[in-house]
Image (cartoon, coloured by chain):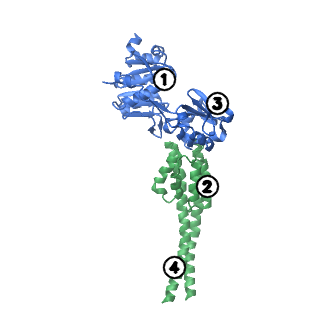
Amino acid sequence: MLRLLGVIMIFSAFSWAGFSFSTSIRRKIARLETEKKLTDDISTLIRYRSLTLREIISQIAESPGYAEIEFIEYASSADRYIPFAESWKSGIEKDRTLSNTERDILEKMGYELGTTDAEGQMAVLNIYRNQFEEMLSAEKTKYETKGKMYRSLGVLFGAMAGILFI
Amino acid sequence: MIRKYNIRKLAPYFSDKIGSAVSKITSADAEHISEIRLRTGRPVSLSVCGKEKFLTQSGGLTECEGMAVTANMNDIEKSFNAVCDYSVHSYGREISEGFITIEGGNRVGICGTAVTENNCIKTLKYISGLNFRISGQAFGCADEICKRYFNEKPCSMLIVGPPSSGKTTILKDICRILGSSYKISVIDERGEIGAVYHGVPQNSVGLMTDIFDGYPKAYGITSAVRVMSPQIIVCDELGGNDDCEAVLNSVSTGVKIIASMHGFTEQAILSNKGIRQLAESGMFEYAAVLEGDTVPGKIKYVKKVVDVIC
C-alpha cells in the first residue's frame, strides 16, 4: 500500500514539474501581452487625452487588466514630487515577477517617458512595443514547441520513476 | 486683503540645493517675495517689493551675488521637469506659450531657445531661465463695484486700465463675488483668472463659476453661450476682431459681458475698432477706469459707456 502511494506521489511530482514549466511560459506570454498593451494604452492616453504620466499610471493601476503587473501599483503610489523615472524604476526593482530582459526594457522606457512632446512619445513607445512584440512571438514559439514537451516529459519521467520505484 | 501662496511649498519644484534654500526663507521675507528666478550659471534672484535680491544657501536675502546660491543647467532642468510634472508631452501648448501654471495658481515663465515652425513657436530647447511668479489674490477690491452695479441684476462692464493696474485682479474678485449669485462663465485664455491646475481652479472664483481654461476668447465665448447658458461671461483683455465679433453674437442671447481692456482712460474704447463697435451696439453699459500701476486693483471712477461714445 505504501509503495503504491509512493508511486503515485513520484508520478504526480514529475508531472507537476512538467506542467509547471509549461505554465511558467504561458504566464510569461500573458505578462508580455499585458506589457505590450501597456505601451498601447500609454500611447493612447498621451495622444488623445494629453494626460501626465502620473495620471496615466494611476488610471492604469486602477484598471483590472493590469492587476498582475505589480510594478505599476508601486509606481502609481510614489510621491508626486519624485521624478517619474525614479518611481518607475523603484517599482520595477520591487517587482519580482519580471525577467531581466523585461526589467531592462521597462527601465529604459521609464527614462524616456515624459521627456519629449507627444509625437516623440509615440515614436518611443512604438519602439518598446515592438521589443515586447518580438519577445512575445519568441515566447509563443517556445510555448508551442517546448510547452508540450515539458508536459509530456513530466508525465513520462513520472511514469518511469514510478516503474523503477516498484 | 491680499492672500499670498506660501513660497516654501514650492521647494519640491527645485533641485535639492535650491529647494533647501527656498524652504529656509523666513515667513517675514516670504510675504514680500513675488518672483523667484533661475538663470543658468547665475545666482538665484528674488523680486522683493519690486527690488532684485539674491538667495543665500541659508534662505536669507542678500544683495551680494557672491554669497548667493547659483543655478546650473541641471538645477534648471530638474525644475523644468518638475514644473511639467515630468510629462513634457502634456504641456506642449503651455511651453510654446512660455508659461506653465502649477499648484496654487503659481505661474512659471520659461525662457530658452525657440524652435519655430510656420512662424509659430513649436517648442523650446535649451531652457536657460525659469521665473516662478508667486500667486496672490486680492480679496475685496471689487466689493464696492459689485454692490453698486450688480446688486439687483447683472450688467455688462468694461474694466479699463494701463499695464499693471490690476485689471485681472479686479476680474478675479468680481468672479469670486458674483459667482455666488449668478451663473458665470470665465473665458480664461491665459489661465490668469482661475489659474486652473489639473482641472481645479486655484483661485477662489465663486460657487457658480465655470472656467473655460485655455480657450481662445472667440471660441470660448461661443462655446460658453451654447453649452453653459451663463448669465455673465468674464474675459480678460478684449480687443481682437474675432473676440468682439463673438461678443456681438452673444448679445442676442441676453448674456452680460465683463471684460478688461488696455487703456489709460475711457477714451481707449473709441480707439479700438472692435470695442468701439461693441460700445455703439449698446453691449456695454459701464466702463470702470482703474487708478494705474501706483495703486493696482483700485477703481478710479465708473462711467456710462453711452456718455463716452456720445
Observer-side mark, 1 or 3, equals 3
Which residue does the image show at 47% across and 26% down from the upper left?
Answer: B168
Q: Please, what secondary structure does the residue beneath circle 2 have?
A: helix
Figure colour of chain A: green
Observer-side mark, 2 or 1, equals 1
Q: Position of residue B69 (x, y in %)?
A: 65, 38
Kindly identify the amino acid type of the residue bearing the numbered disc 2. Ile
Q: Are marks 2 and 4 on the same chain?
A: yes
Q: Please, what secondary structure does the residue beneath circle 1 have?
A: loop
Between the C-alphas of marks 1 and 3, the distance is 27 Å
Query: Is B75 located above or below residue A61 in the figure?
Result: above
Kindly identify the amino acid type of the residue bearing the numbered disc 3. Glu
Confirm or deny contact between disc 4 and disc 1 (CB under 8 A): no
Q: Quadrant of residue B223?
A: top left
Q: Are marks 1 and 3 on the same chain?
A: yes
- A104 or B101: which is nearer to us? B101
Q: Position of residue A92 (x, y in %)?
A: 57, 56
| Chain under numbered label 3 | B
Figure colour of chain B: blue
Name the residue beneath numbered marker 2. A105
Which residue does the image show at 41% across and 18% down from the upper left?
Answer: B287
Between the C-alphas of marks 4 and 1, the distance is 85 Å
Confirm or deny contact between disc 4 and disc 3 (CB under 8 A): no
Q: Position of residue B252 (x, y in %)?
A: 35, 23
| Chain under numbered label 2 | A
Q: Quadrant of residue A122?
A: top right
Q: Is residue B70 visible?
A: yes
Query: Could you say which disc has been placed on residue B63 in the image?
Result: 3
| Chain under numbered label 4 | A
Q: Quadrant of the N terminus of chain B?
A: top left
Name the residue beneath numbered marker 4. A12
